[in-house]
Every structure is written in structure tokens, then in C-alpha cells.
Image (cartoon, helix red, strand yellow):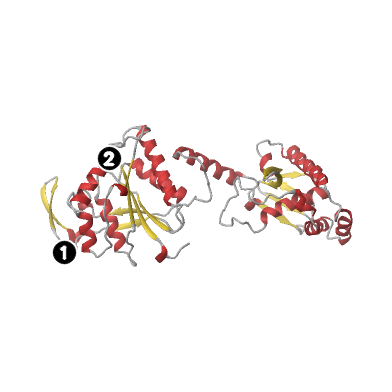
Amino acid sequence: MPSPKQFREVLIFVAGATPQIITETIYALAMQNPPIHADELHIITHSHGKQLIMQKLGKDGVLQQLCTEYGMPRLSLSDANFLVITDQDGNELSDIRTVADNEQAGDQIAAFLRTKAAEPSVRLHCSLSGGRKTMTHYMGIAFQLFARQWDRLYHVMVAPEFEKVEQFFYPPKQPQQLTVKSRTGEVNINTADANVSLVQLPMIHLRDKVPSQATTIREIVAEGQKEIDMAATQRPVRINLAERTLYIGDTLIDLSPIQLMLYTTFLNLKRQPCRFSSRDYCHECTACFIPLVELTSSEAIEQMAKDYQAIYGDDPLKAEELLEKWDRNLQTDLLRQQISKINAAIRDDLNDPTLLPIYKVSTVKQYGSSRYGVRVEKGKIAVSSVACTT
């Protein structure tokens, strides 16, 4: 993660007919300690919203006035600052009204955030204060799916009497009296009373927990939910070498000592320091899968011999027996035979075809060779060599 000074601060808004939320947010960020000034500004809206924002903040000079008044870096508005939602044919939408419009908005908001969050030196400041309620919802969902820990999501708030005042964009340094219409007639309000506050919204970050190659927001959410459900509902795997037991959930799997030793080896591959340690879930990752030939090395056999010794009550003679039998003589065909027997035992004892792919020793083809491993989540694995005393 870059230090704060190394970040490019990127502001992203969903907006509609209320350009005020843009200047209010920029103002509120500048008032923080330390202040945050935008290096980039992006506004996701429809064509009517773009026209209104360009008029109020650009042509009328409100945005430049804010920057000048508070000594901020200059921000200008051009077509490059806008992502205008389009229909399936690429035509800009004047508003977001239909189901199809909302689907398009969701997909395009998600795609934009995914792209910006892929830039490592950028910190995103995303606002969901403007636009249609569905647009703010999609912004929140996309932020959860793609944002990094250092990105921020906000909602800007202003005193109620200023919420729908068209001529109010931020509190000027020199307070001003504004005349506004109310239910009882015209009333005067003073900008000194306009308390603008920025709420940083807490969020569950799912970026590395539910990776997805899908392109539509609905597909991304569906895949993410499936991954979370699978990870959360997997049964724990518990091996106790001293007791010669393998439990998947509450189901005891009947394995011979050799098979228990070999299955333990595959589980230990998942328990080793992971090259993707930042990921809480393995999902479809097979980085810890290995070619069987790696298990025929002296180092691998010595480690398996230690587990074999633990299975036999820590009897060193059993380790020596295995080393004498396997060292320099272990063939991959023998390992494949044992793997086949392990998978048959798990299939028969577990008796659940939907769970079998998670717990069996699986094979994947990679770089022209076969690699072997177990797909169960690493956080679900427990291996012990000490017998229970209770």
C-alpha cells in the first residue's frame, strides 16, 4: 500500500440533478485534517445530469470559485470527467427510469470502479449521495466488490434547510444571506449555519474474497454469493494422527495408515505459508497443487515418515521402515493407486456427491503435467499428532 503522499486522490460521484453534492463533498474533504484535494474527478450520470452539472459547476464557475476561495488545486470540467450511462446500443440515456436503464447503469458503474481500483497508486473517494437510488446502490455494491482497504466511500450531509436550496453549493468563507421558499412563504437563511459533514461509510471489503470474471453486476453478485456460501458451509477437516482418525465434519473416513499419511501430506500443502496470504479464501486457487514426482523426493518422504511415525504412537521403527521401503524407490504409480483408494473411501463414507469435489484429492492439468491437491478451504483444516485425553 502506498503512503498517503504517494496516492493520487481520485473522486468518483454518482449524480443526477443535484450538482451540489459534488461541491459539498469536495469542500468537506478539503476541510479534513489533513485535507484531501482531488487529483482526478469523475462523475457518473445521465445526459441531463451532465448538462446540468456542466452548466452549474462549469460555465457558471462554481467549481472554480470553490477552488480559488479555499486555495485548492484547480479543478476543471470537460467531457473527460463524465461517464454518461448508455443503453445497449451505446446511446446516452437522458435519465435512469426503466429496468433496462438500471441494469445498464449497474454494469457500467461496476466496470468503471473495477478499472479504477486496478490502479495501485490511486486512492478512490466514492460518493453515493446523488443520482437515482438504484445508482447509489450499485455504487455501494461495486465499492464492496472492487475497492481496496485504503479506498473510501462517503455520504455528504448538509443542514436540512439547505438540502434543496439551488443557490447553495458550499459554505463560502464570507457568510451570505439566502432567501428561499418555504411552505409558509419566503424565509432567510444564513450560510454560516450550513453545517456540511462527510460520513465515511463502513464496508465489508470483498475484493480478494469473491474474485469474478463476470461482466454484469448481477452475474458478479451471484458468483460472489456462491463463493461465500461455499466457503462458509464447508465442513471442517480434522486429522488426529495419534488416533488414526480423519473426520470431515462429523463423518469418520476409514483410511489405512499409509492413506492417512498421504492425505495429511496434501492437507499440509494447504496449511503451509500461502503465496496469496492476503486471501481469506482459496476458492478455485490451485497454487498449492503439486506434481506427484515432488512427493518422491527424499525431503518429502522424510516428512511423510514423521507423520507415519506419529500414526504408530511415535514409534521411530515405523519411520525407518517407511524410509527403507520408499526412499529412492517410491514410484508415482504407487501414489496414484493410494490416491484412488483415498478418494473411494471419502466418496463411500461421506456419501454426498456435492461435497466430494471439495475433499477428494483432485487433479488439474497445468503446463502439460498433472498437479494434485485438495480444494477444501485452508481455514477448515486441522491436523494434530497428539491424542485427545478427554
Q: Residue 95 or 318: which is nearer the viewer?
A: 95
- Residue that label 2 marks: 47
- Residue 383: give x, y in percent of width and height: 72, 55
- Residue 139: give x, y in percent of width and height: 38, 46
Q: Residue at x 38, y 60 (%)?
A: 8
Helix, strand or loop status at disc 2: helix
* Category of crowding for the residue at label 1, using alpha-carbon neighbours closer than 10 angstroms: few (below 14), some (14–19), many (at least 20): few
Q: In which quarter of the image is residue 88?
A: top left
C-alpha distance separating marks 2 and 1: 34 Å
Q: In which quarter of the image is residue 359?
A: top right
Give the amino acid at mark 1. Gln
**Residue 129 appears in the picture as rendered:** no
* Category of crowding for the residue at label 2, using alpha-carbon neighbours closer than 10 angstroms: few (below 14), some (14–19), many (at least 20): many
Q: Which residue is drawn at 76% across and 44% down?
A: 253
Q: Residue 154 or 59: which is nearer the viewer?
A: 59
The disc label shown at residue 174, or none = 1
Q: In which quarter of the image is residue 349?
A: top right
Image quarter in which the C terminus is found: bottom right
